[in-house]
């Protein structure tokens, strides 16, 4: 069972060389003849009605080819069918500073930028809403007319009997937690190149090709066809290399639509690449979340009930919001055994950029609150924090109280291993003053069991083509965004077919060439596209096996595909082709092996670009060779090279193709209540982490020294890749825990750049010890589950709990900036209070002041200074001051 | 964000450079390392017709120890060279330490000491793109007539965020300023105005060419402490430089400079009187920290809250004094 040749081996990503040498092409590296540059004009107001747009002066500017405005493409779109509230460019209203108003297409970036200054717009400024709880009181000037009280969506779920649960509890904790807004900060800014082919009959723009930095080429194809009113078949989306997504490219981003609309109007290819500031405005990150959480436990540590009220500051558009607010509630379940859950979730609209999906979509902020509160309860009942988590394990397989089916469940082992490796029992509570350990757990879906567009279609389909050259070409719609999806695909195909990795070529994410895959989000690719690949490869393998069995005069069941050859089980090697006819012996695992190459030989092979030597009979000339081979054959053989078998199979069957698809099984698709569609997954990953931190009690600075992170990924198809994902998750979680925060003033994002946004640098990165736990999921490909998102959510509470262990303060608001930590320390010691609100607008809501969020307040609104040039009749032209 | 169009001037000598400056006085920006100027030009904070690239003037590079024990540093000397200089590390450790904390290694390879001294003051409302500033409303420092940090006032509070100037102030450094009209030499402490917008006393036709470290400041124990959120890349959110000269276990001389909490780097005036003649202990260090915190006037120009940054001036000064005294 474990005798794999490629699965489970640490393998370099198949695109690693082109990325590390700079040879690889990302969207912004692309250029086509006649290509123009597009630049977008953004709203200076958080909430305003557009009364008039005059693009005349801009259109006449030398070098400008076209100016695009909202009415050029008025159809609404949005990633969710229930949230079609966006337009390519604003039609009548702008809803945040940075909203898209117009686009100038010109021969150069600088000309386009200058022409933007010449677009004259008259706005009628409206009252704006920046705080979700204020926004929910709105009676007039709604952000979207169809959403009363500016509530995008609210859900109210009760599972079990929460009141009874709290009555049974011996200890109850109740608190408000706030997790501030963070964004993905992927290294590659979004970029899109759109090009129309002219229709040869009409001379008008015909077929459209879009190259874009996207995680979801098929959704992009769908939305483009909606907005442009073109058949999907006339729209081709190609995903070049993508420099990180983390969810920020998992829906259609305004520039993708704008570039296509602009290319149509300019009748020329148009490329738009966001500046970093525009990336922050496009956003779709993790919303600021206010969590009022109540948890009850018995004195022996059993959780009796959980009640959560969650308010998410969703920004100005729906985006994935409805899904986010549902995940926040649904993923209270499926980690621990919680019998009674009450959940009230509100997704609220505000005049800020739209929040969307971000690594650990929906679960992260609530997990921070829950794991922090569980720690508090452990302290209250005098129980070890690791023990209280072990006291609430699920008895799997099971279906949770909120309808989530859990099969493989590696959480117990994750907790055990982190506790053991971190020296938890010996060191917890015994570290020097100011230093502490904290533990937390998390989990995540391996793909959503229900796609966002409800249908019975497969979530992934994969085609495989093998031709007489012996090359295996896998066509998959799955989007490689740096997470390793192409490598995973190649590994699975190679493993099934017994070929080396170099034999497999992956053609991915091109809607003209590859079968549909709904995208790289919700950690679905390994599970779903992996299963589809497995099925496609198995199908084509059957064809090859049938031919080979006939040639070898044996049963199909007797054949083994391995090391670029097909062997007959237990057969002698006489007559076998030379490449397979080396010395014999047991393989690395001590099992009988059909041939003698060692495990390390195979690894070298899979790393190398060189294909194994083709059989001497063939001598590299497949067609002639196969005839010679036929002539020379004398009786049945005990092995064939892969090439020989392929040639035989094509001779017998004709074309050699296989196809496989995957749709989650009905029993994994969740319950029947409203909103039950979000949360169910065919499998869940599990994570437990211990963080070791020290806190400087004079400055409040927190240093994370080490994180032990165990992750149950079902089976590690590529352990080095899994470890990379775990380390990346921990690092990203640490950013949210300590430094990252989008800071707002009056709807202005104060830190829309990587200098002021402050993702951790390599200097702050702690040692991370990734621990892989393999629970072998019954439905995952080779037992695999997700490994890219689940670990993130545990890091934030692990650090929070470690801070509590170190200095005895409980932080209820992330990130744990030094000022927040110091304020908490001062409050605990009754020392001179640190007034974090000095200089804060006294009219700002108390809640911001009491949480030290002096940089986030609802100030004087959108009113501008009377002499502000942006309010003058004629807008000033950049550079005209000179 | 594209760079505005400009004509690049690449002089080989100081004379040539000041000639260009005289010619294009009001329409030229000086580029030394470019780490601050280039991003600012992309944000359209500066749109000069000419950029004067000094990097070809080899005479403006290098650290030259003087016969009297002092030193002369060319304004184009990179921060990396200062950080790595054995001479400076031995005789003027506070400067080498301050230089080592600037930004990140990549930026220190480009950034120069002259550029760090002349560094434009910074503010969250100022170091933003043109589109952002249009949305927010322009401020006194650029194109506008109000201050977002201290509404109602007409003073610009943009904060001086260089790391090396507080160290240089502690060392009583002087700088040489050259123009077509001649050469002048001023104490660094007289170079800054204390205003956020017009922050330095440098005419548009003038160039900072050399930094002089006096011999009598050599050999002081020195420490620089910097508050920042990340261990790399960030500008200081508060910075403290301390130099102490001891004799017989007592402080013979001391100076303390602070940065990133005012529109200019400042010497803490009362610090010397508090320290001189005494043995440094925790209580004394705390008292010095208190006067340093009083000199600081942080506002919401930067990340973290003003109160916290003032508090950190106090803590970092205390720690720096103790560390310098323990050397």
Image (tube, helix red, strand yellow):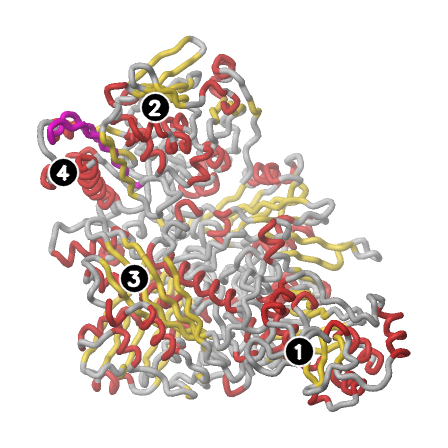
Q: Which residue is mark 4?
A: B285
Q: Which residue is mark 2?
A: B200
Q: Residues within 10 Å of mark 1 (few under 14, many from 20)?
A: some
In which quarter of the view is residue B60 placed? top left
Q: Which residue is mark 3?
A: A692
Is B246 colored magenta in this rendering? yes
Dot 3 and dot 4 within a common chain: no
Mark 2 and mark 3: Cα distance apart in space: 46 Å
Q: Can you give x and y, in whole percent of width and height, for residue A617 in the image?
A: 83, 72
Say which residue appears at 25% left-offset and 51% top-offset: A819
Mark 1 and mark 4: Cα distance apart in space: 77 Å
| Chain of residue at mark 1 | A
Q: Earlier in the sequence, mark 4 or mark 2?
A: 2
Depth check, mark 1 against mark 4: the one in front is 1
Quick one: A41 or B220, which is closer to the camera? Answer: B220
In which quarter of the view is residue A732 placed? bottom left
User: Is residue A399 visible to us here?
Assistant: yes
| Chain of residue at mark 3 | A
Circles 2 and 1: CB atoms closer than 8 Å: no
Q: Residues within 10 Å of mark 3 (few under 14, many from 20)?
A: many
Quick one: A162 or A828, which is closer to the camera? Answer: A828
**Which contiguous range is marked in magenta?**
B237-256
In the picture, measured across the screen, residue B18 lies left or right of residue A810, that is right
Q: Which residue is mark 1?
A: A584
């Amino acid at each position: 069972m474990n005798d794999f040749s490629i699965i489970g081996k640490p393998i370099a990503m198949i695109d690693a060389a082109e990325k590390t040498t700079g040879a690889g092409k990302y969207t912004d590296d692309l250029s086509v003849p006649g290509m123009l540059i597009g630049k977008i004009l953004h709203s200076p107001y958080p909430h305003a009605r557009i009364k008039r747009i005059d693009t005349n002066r801009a259109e006449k500017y030398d070098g400008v080819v076209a100016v695009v405005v909202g009415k050029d493409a008025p159809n609404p779109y949005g990633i969710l069918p229930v949230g079609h509230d966006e337009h390519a460019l604003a039609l009548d209203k702008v809803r945040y500073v940075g909203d898209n108003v117009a686009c100038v297409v010109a021969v150069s970036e600088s000309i386009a930028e200058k022409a933007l200054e010449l677009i004259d717009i008259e706005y009628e400024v409206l009252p704006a809403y920046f705080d979700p709880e204020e926004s929910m009181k709105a009676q007039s000037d709604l952000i979207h007319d169809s959403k009363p009280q500016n509530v995008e969506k609210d859900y109210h779920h009760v599972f079990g009997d929460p009141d009874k649960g709290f009555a049974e509890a011996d200890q109850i904790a109740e608190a408000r937690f706030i997790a501030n807004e963070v964004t993905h900060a992927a290294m590659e800014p979004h970029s899109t190149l759109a090009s129309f082919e002219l229709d040869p009959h009409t001379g008008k723009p015909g077929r459209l090709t879009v190259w874009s930095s996207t995680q979801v080429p098929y959704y992009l194809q769908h939305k483009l066809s909606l907005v442009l009113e073109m058949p999907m078949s006339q729209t081709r989306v190609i995903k070049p290399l993508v420099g990180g997504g983390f969810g920020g490219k998992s829906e259609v981003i305004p520039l993708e639509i704008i570039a296509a609309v602009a290319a149509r109007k300019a009748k020329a290819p148009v490329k738009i690449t966001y500046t970093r500031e525009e990336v922050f405005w496009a956003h779709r990150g993790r919303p600021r979340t206010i969590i009022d959480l109540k948890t009850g436990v018995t004195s022996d540590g059993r959780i009796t009930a959980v009640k959560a009220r969650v308010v998410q500051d969703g920004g100005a558009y729906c985006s994935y919001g409805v899904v986010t607010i549902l995940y926040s509630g649904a993923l209270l379940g499926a980690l621990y055994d919680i019998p009674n859950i009450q959940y009230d979730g509100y997704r609220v609209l505000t005049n800020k950029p739209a929040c969307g999906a971000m690594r650990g979509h929906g679960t992260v902020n609530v997990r921070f609150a829950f794991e922090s509160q569980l720690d508090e309860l452990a302290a209250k009942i005098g129980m070890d924090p690791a023990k209280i988590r072990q006291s609430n394990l699920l008895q799997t397989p099971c279906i949770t109280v909120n309808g989530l089916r859990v099969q493989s469940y590696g959480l117990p082992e994750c907790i055990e291993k982190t506790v053991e490796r971190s020296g938890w029992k010996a060191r917890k509570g015994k570290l020097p003053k100011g230093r502490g350990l904290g533990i937390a757990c998390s989990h995540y879906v391996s793909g959503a069991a229900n796609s966002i567009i409800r249908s019975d279609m497969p979530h992934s389909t994969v085609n495989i083509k093998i031709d007489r050259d012996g090359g295996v070409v896998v066509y998959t719609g799955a989007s490689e965004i740096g997470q390793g999806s192409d490598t995973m695909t190649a590994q699975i195909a190679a493993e099934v077919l017994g070929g080396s990795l170099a034999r497999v070529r992956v053609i991915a994410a091109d809607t003209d060439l590859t079968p549909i895959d709904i995208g790289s989000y919700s950690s679905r690719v390994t599970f779903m596209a992996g299963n589809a690949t497995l099925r496609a490869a198995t199908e084509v393998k059957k064809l090859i096996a049938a031919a080979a069995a006939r040639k070898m005069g044996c049963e199909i069941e007797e054949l083994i595909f391995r090391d670029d050859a097909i062997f007959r089980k237990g057969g002698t090697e006489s007559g076998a082709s030379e490449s397979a006819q080396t010395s014999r012996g047991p393989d690395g695992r001590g099992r009988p092996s059909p041939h003698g190459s060692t495990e390390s030989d195979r690894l070298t092979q899979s790393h190398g670009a060189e294909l194994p030597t083709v059989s001497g009979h063939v001598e590299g000339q497949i067609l002639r060779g196969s005839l010679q081979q036929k002539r020379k054959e004398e009786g049945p053989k005990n092995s064939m090279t892969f090439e020989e078998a392929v040639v035989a199979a094509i001779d017998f069957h004709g074309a050699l193709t296989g196809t496989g698809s995957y749709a989650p099984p009905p029993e994994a698709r969740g319950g029947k209540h409203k909103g039950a569609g979000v949360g169910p997954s065919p499998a869940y990953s599990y994570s437990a982490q211990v963080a070791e931190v020290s806190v400087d009690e004079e400055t409040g600075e927190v240093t994370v020294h080490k994180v032990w992170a165990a992750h149950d990924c079902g089976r590690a198809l590529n352990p080095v890749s899994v470890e990379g994902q775990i380390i990346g998750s921990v690092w990203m979680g640490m950013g949210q825990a300590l430094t990252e925060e989008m800071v707002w003033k009056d709807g202005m994002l104060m830190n829309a750049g990587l200098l002021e946004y402050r993702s951790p640098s390599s200097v702050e990165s702690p040692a991370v010890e990734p621990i892989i736990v393999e629970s072998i999921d019954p439905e995952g490909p080779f037992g695999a589950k997700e490994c890219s998102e689940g670990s993130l959510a545990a890091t934030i509470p692990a650090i929070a709990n470690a801070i509590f262990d170190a200095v005895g303060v409980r932080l209820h608001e992330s990130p744990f900036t030094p000022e927040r930590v110091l304020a908490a320390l001062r409050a605990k010691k009754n020392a001179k209070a640190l007034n974090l609100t000095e200089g804060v607008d006294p009219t700002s809501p108390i809640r911001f002041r009491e949480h030290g969020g002096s940089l986030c307040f609802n100030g004087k609104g959108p009113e501008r200074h009377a002499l502000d040039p942006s309010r003058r009749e004629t807008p000033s032209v950049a550079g005209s001051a000179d | 964000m594209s760079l505005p169009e400009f004509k690049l001037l690449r002089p080989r000598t100081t004379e040539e450079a000041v000639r260009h400056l005289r010619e294009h006085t009001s329409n030229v920006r000086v580029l030394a390392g470019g780490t601050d100027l280039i991003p600012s030009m992309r944000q359209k904070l500066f749109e000069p017709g000419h950029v004067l690239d000094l990097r070809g003037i080899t005479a403006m590079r290098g650290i030259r120890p003087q016969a009297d024990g002092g030193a002369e540093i060319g304004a184009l000397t990179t921060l990396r060279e200062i950080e790595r200089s054995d001479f400076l590390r031995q005789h003027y450790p506070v400067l080498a330490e301050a230089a080592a904390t600037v930004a990140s290694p990549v930026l220190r390879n480009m950034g120069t000491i002259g550029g760090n001294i002349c560094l434009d003051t910074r503010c969250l409302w100022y170091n933003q793109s043109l589109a952002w500033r249009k949305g927010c409303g322009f401020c006194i420092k650029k194109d506008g007539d109000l201050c977002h940090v201290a509404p109602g006032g007409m003073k610009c509070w943009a904060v001086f965020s260089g790391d090396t100037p507080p160290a240089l102030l502690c060392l009583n450094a002087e700088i040489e300023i050259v123009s077509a009209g001649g050469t002048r030499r001023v104490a660094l402490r007289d170079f800054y105005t204390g205003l956020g917008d017009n922050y330095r006393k440098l005419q548009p036709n003038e160039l900072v060419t050399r930094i002089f470290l006096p011999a009598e400041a050599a050999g002081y124990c020195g420490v620089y402490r910097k508050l920042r959120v990340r261990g790399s890349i960030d500008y200081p959110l508060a910075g403290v430089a301390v130099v102490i000269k001891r004799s017989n276990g007592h402080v013979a001389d001391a100076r303390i400079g602070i940065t990133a909490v005012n529109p200019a780097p400042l010497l803490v005036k009362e610090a010397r009187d508090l320290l001189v003649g005494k043995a440094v202990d925790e209580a004394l260090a705390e008292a010095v920290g208190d006067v340093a915190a009083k000199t600081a006037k942080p506002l919401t120009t930067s990340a973290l809250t003003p109160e916290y940054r003032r508090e950190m001036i106090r803590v970092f000064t205390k720690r720096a004094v103790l560390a310098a005294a323990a050397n």
